[in-house]
Image: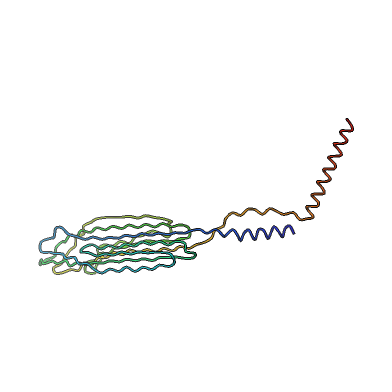
Amino acid sequence: MLKLALSLGVVVASLFTVQTPVLAIGIFSDFVKLSLGNDSLPSGTSISFFPGSMSTPSASLGNAVASTFASSTAGIVTASVSGSAGPSSGFSSAFASAASEGWAIIFNDNPTSVTFPLAVSHTEAYSTSTGPGASVFAAGLYQLSLDTSSLASDVSGCGFAVASCDSFSSSWQTLFLGLSPGSHALQFSVTAFGVVAAADFLVPTPVPTPVPTPEPASLFLLGSSMVGVGLAFRRLRARARSDT
């Protein structure tokens, strides 16, 4: 009976070790910007920038939230996203993607090819933060091409394998394009992407070790033994007094 009671106590205790909720929160932020320009045009050339199209889809589940932003002005395209997901008595997730693109026409009116300098600057910033039970990822890319031929591109991001991360890069460079006579199409775009998922889950918590409860028979034997010890002690003390 004692072994059975102890076994049941251990089983019940193990069931209660999974009753402490852990709150998981994931956050992402992603920003990408690409700027083009030219201050000193070669003789007989020109460049005209035009704003392009933008798209900003997003979706969320549970108490997750997501926001997107994209803009395109003459020579500048920008895209950014942010989102977070936390406990919602189950599962929550958010997805966000923002894309922006622009284009330009470069014209070479010379009878021969010329070298055309194009100033390019870009900025990328990613950050993620997670708690237990959350997964998050942020990434972005930019692309620049001339007449369908790639001039420059970059893809980067962080998250998932790392609980939290921050990534920032900013650079400026001048590309020297070899332009044949006539017009040329310059396309450039940026994309920001983020996804996060979080769920409530339970973890073990310490449970006090069950204290064995003696059976009635054990209590009777223990009581009898104590009574016997008490009587023997009383007899020894009485004998000691009579001897004195």
Location of residue 2 in the rendering, given as x and y in whole percent from the top left corner: 73, 57
Location of residue 111 in the rendering, given as x and y in whole percent from the top left corner: 10, 67
* Horizontal relation, residue 156 to residue 221: left or right: left
* Horizontal relation, residue 130 to residue 30: left or right: right
Location of residue 154 in the rendering, given as x and y in whole percent from the top left corner: 30, 61
Residue found 36% across the figure and 66% down from its top: 96
Residue found 49% across the figure and 65% down from its top: 90
Image height check: is 216 above or below 96? above
Image height check: is 143 above or below 215? below
Q: Nearer the viewer, residue 98 or 38?
A: 98
Quarter in which the C terminus is drawn:
top right
Q: Quadrant of residue 45?
A: bottom left
Residue found 48% across the figure and 60% down from its top: 133
Location of residue 79 in the rendering, given as x and y in whole percent from the top left corner: 30, 63
Residue found 78% across the figure and 55% down from its top: 216
Quarter in which the N terminus is drawn:
bottom right
Residue lying at the far right in this picture: please name it.
242
* Horizontal relation, residue 14 to residue 116: left or right: right
